[in-house]
Image (tube, helix red, strand yellow):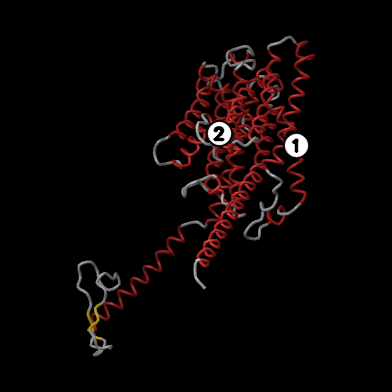
């Protein structure tokens, strides 16, 4: 049993080097050459020392993850302070008469990307909560295995948070120091870089996720196919970013007509001025996309509720165009006739949208969200708390009223107020996402349970039929 000839594996790195002969020894007789045994034990000790010393030296050279994270946070705050200091000093160098107009233009170029950055940060929080609550958002949105996690979303948001304010600071600094041509190139380069990253055809920068987003946007613009959950979910988010599309149109218009960092844009009646007819048409586009999606759903399913949903989106159209009429009618005509119509349409749109959010999109299904699989402070504070649902419904109603302000072009004199209202609308949509996805997840689970019960009933019926065929 123990007297056979045993040959060590020839590919073992501890027994031989490349090209050497295998070591053979007899266990029964115990006659092993002393030189071979000594060499073997010496090589084993040497390898153990090398394997033990290499990780220790590498670990000693590399900083700890906590220290590295603290260094990144410190560097991030130093960068933020530098941008604020340089931007403030640059603005103070300008004359008081042009300061507000210049800041209005700067916000016009960078406001859309700042709001998109905020949306990406909040979307990462949504995904983190879904992962903690075991809500399979990948199954809901029909994502592949390479979909982005909340950590990767936050990484993208971090880079956006760094790049956009840096470009804005460079724009302020260059313009205030007389480098007008270089200042005008900053927003142009930033917008071109964003477009190039989105359409870059090579397998970098999350190619599959970028193309998934572009494909979804194409399906939203042309709803020629059956509407999936991700299609109308993204379209709903786009309605909250109507102000972003409006500012994008005006920014691109000024870039095309070479009005960046010039006094041509000061005139309200210019090609890209605040009285342009393109503003209400761009504002209404997300609602039209969602409106045609509802009509497509009615064609495919025949459900009348989709027509009621389409009616909800159509109520935003009068708010937008009645507001734009202020710049194209006499002031008395606006005050006595169009302004009351604008107020009535705004109230109707806000109340109808609030009703639909609570009863249809959420379906009063405040049951599972914030119930984390592991103990967590957020789960303890938010899950099952009545104040959370009262807060969500109350803030949703108030921010729906602010939605009217966002859609009304004639109220956009204070760019900081408009930016704050647009940011609050994105926050409202961030809250809406939790309960809308939860509602869809509950529906999917109920359908699965119904299908399983029907399958069990069918199997039981087949067993009964087979048993009745036997002769007793």
Which residue lies most toward the bottom here?
29
Element marked by disc 1: helix
**Structural crowding at the residue carrying mark 2, measured as other residues with C-alpha within 10 Å and reported as few (<14), some (14–19) or many (≥20):** some
> Which residue shows up at 52% across the image and 16% down it?
257
Q: Position of residue 55 (x, y in %)?
A: 42, 64
Q: Position of residue 154 (x, y in %)?
A: 56, 45
- Across the whole image, how many numbered discs are drawn on residues? 2
Q: Position of residue 316 (x, y in %)?
A: 68, 26
Which residue lies most toward the top here?
330
**How many angstroms separate mark 1 from mark 2 (CA)?**
32 Å
Residue 229: name its quadrant: top right
Q: Which residue is mark 1?
A: 397
Element marked by disc 2: helix
Residue 416: name its quadrant: top right
> Which residue shows up at 60% across the image and 52% down it?
445
> Which residue shows up at 28% across the image and 88% down it?
2
192 or 373: nearer the viewer: 373
In the displayed structure image, the side of residue 355 where residue 222 appears, left or right: left
55 or 325: nearer the viewer: 325
């Amino acid at each position: 049993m123990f007297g056979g000839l045993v040959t060590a594996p020839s590919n073992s790195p501890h027994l031989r080097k490349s090209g050497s002969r295998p070591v053979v020894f007899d266990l029964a007789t115990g006659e092993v050459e002393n030189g071979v045994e000594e060499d073997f034990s010496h090589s084993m000790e040497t390898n153990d020392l090398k394997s033990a010393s290499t990780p220790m030296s590498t670990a000693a050279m590399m900083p700890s993850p906590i220290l590295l994270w603290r260094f990144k946070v410190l560097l991030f705050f130093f960068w933020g302070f530098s941008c604020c200091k340089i931007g403030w000093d640059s603005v103070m160098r300008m004359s008081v008469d042009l300061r507000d107009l210049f800041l209005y233009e700067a916000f016009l170029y960078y406001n859309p990307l700042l709001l998109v950055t905020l949306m990406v940060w909040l979307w990462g929080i949504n995904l983190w909560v879904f992962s903690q609550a075991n809500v399979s958002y990948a199954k809901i949105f029909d994502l592949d295995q390479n979909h982005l996690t909340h950590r990767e979303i936050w990484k993208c948001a971090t880079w956006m948070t760094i790049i956009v304010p840096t470009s804005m600071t460079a724009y302020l600094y260059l313009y205030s120091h007389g480098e007008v041509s270089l200042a005008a190139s900053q927003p142009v380069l930033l917008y071109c870089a964003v477009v190039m990253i989105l359409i870059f055809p090579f397998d970098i920068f999350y190619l599959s996720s970028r193309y998934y987003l572009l494909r979804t946007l194409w399906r939203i613009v042309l709803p020629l196919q059956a509407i999936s959950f991700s299609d109308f979910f993204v379209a709903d988010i786009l309605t909250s970013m109507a102000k972003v599309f409006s500012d994008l149109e005006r920014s691109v218009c000024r870039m095309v007509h070479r009005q960046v960092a010039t006094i041509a844009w000061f005139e309200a009646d210019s090609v890209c001025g605040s009285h342009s007819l393109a503003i209400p048409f761009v504002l209404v586009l997300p609602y039209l996309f969602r409106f045609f999606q509802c009509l497509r759903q009615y064609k495919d399913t025949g459900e009348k509720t989709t027509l009621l949903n389409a009616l909800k989106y159509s109520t935003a159209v009068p708010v937008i165009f009645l507001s734009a009429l202020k710049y194209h009618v006499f002031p008395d005509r606006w005050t006595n006739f169009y302004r009351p119509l604008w107020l009535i349409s705004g109230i109707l749109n806000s109340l109808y949208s609030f009703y639909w959010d609570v009863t249809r999109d959420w379906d009063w299904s405040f049951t599972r969200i914030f119930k984390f699989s592991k103990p967590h402070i957020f789960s303890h504070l938010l899950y099952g708390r009545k104040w959370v649902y009262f807060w969500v419904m109350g803030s949703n109603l108030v921010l729906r009223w602010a939605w009217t302000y966002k859609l009304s072009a004639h109220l956009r004199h204070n760019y900081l107020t408009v930016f704050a209202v647009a940011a609050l609308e994105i926050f409202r949509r961030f809250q809406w996402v939790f309960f809308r996805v939860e509602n869809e997840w509950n529906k999917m689970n109920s359908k699965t349970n119904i299908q399983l019960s029907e399958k069990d009933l069918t199997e039981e019926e087949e067993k009964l039929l087979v048993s009745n065929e036997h002769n007793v």
